[in-house]
Amino acid sequence: MLACWGDRSLTSGEIANSLASNAVLVRRILGGLRAAGLVSSTEGRGGGWSLARAPHEITLYDAYTAVEEGPILSRHLHPPNDECEVGRHMRGLLETEFCAAEQALADRLGRTCIADLAGHVAGQSIDGGS
């Protein structure tokens, strides 16, 4: 949304309205993006949030890692039964698969920048939302 509006700063309320969400939640996410150097904020009248870098310099992976912690796929916290043939080997097998899937997602998100998304939105708006 920030990339689509160009140089105009947007308030957390405006962003929340677009997302049909809560401004407090949006501010929390924007805080993580600010800490990562992806957005900046200005206070006062006419203030709000804007991108801190050009949209083509920010990938979805940058944004994802700014607001999410830990592995993408959750792991079972309890150790398996070592006496069970399946349980004893499953954690290692799944870890290999999960790591490969997480790497594939990171690679894909790293190839998509915010400018790509803004371009798609602009194209859909011009085409009448098709």
Image (cartoon, rainbow, N blue to C red):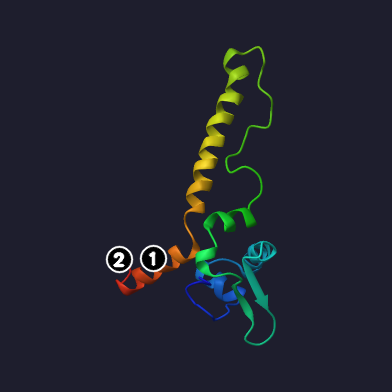
**Circle 1 residues within 10 Å: few <14, some 14–19, many ≥20:** few
**Element on which disc 1 rests:** helix
- Is 63 rendered above or below residue 42? above
Residue 12, placed above or below residue 97: below
Return the residue at label 2.
130
According to the picture, the residue beneath numbered tag 1 turns out to be 120
Q: Residue at x 51, y 38 (%)?
A: 101
Q: Where is residue 67 in the image (x, y as percent from the top left)?
A: 63, 56
Among the two numbered marks 1 and 2 on one chain, the one whose residue lies closer to the N terminus: 1
Total numbered labels placed on residues in the image: 2
Residue 16 in percent (x, y) is at 56, 70
Q: Residue furthest bottom?
A: 45
78 or 43: nearer the viewer: 43
Q: Where is residue 87 in the image (x, y as percent from the top left)?
A: 60, 19
Viewer-nearest residue: 26 or 8 = 8
Q: Relative to residue 43, is residue 123 drawn left or right? A: left
Residue at 62 percent across and 17 percent down: it is 88
Query: What is the C-alpha distance between the residues marked 1 and 2?
Result: 11 Å
* Label 2: element kind: loop
Residue 51 in picture, x, y percent from top left = 58, 71
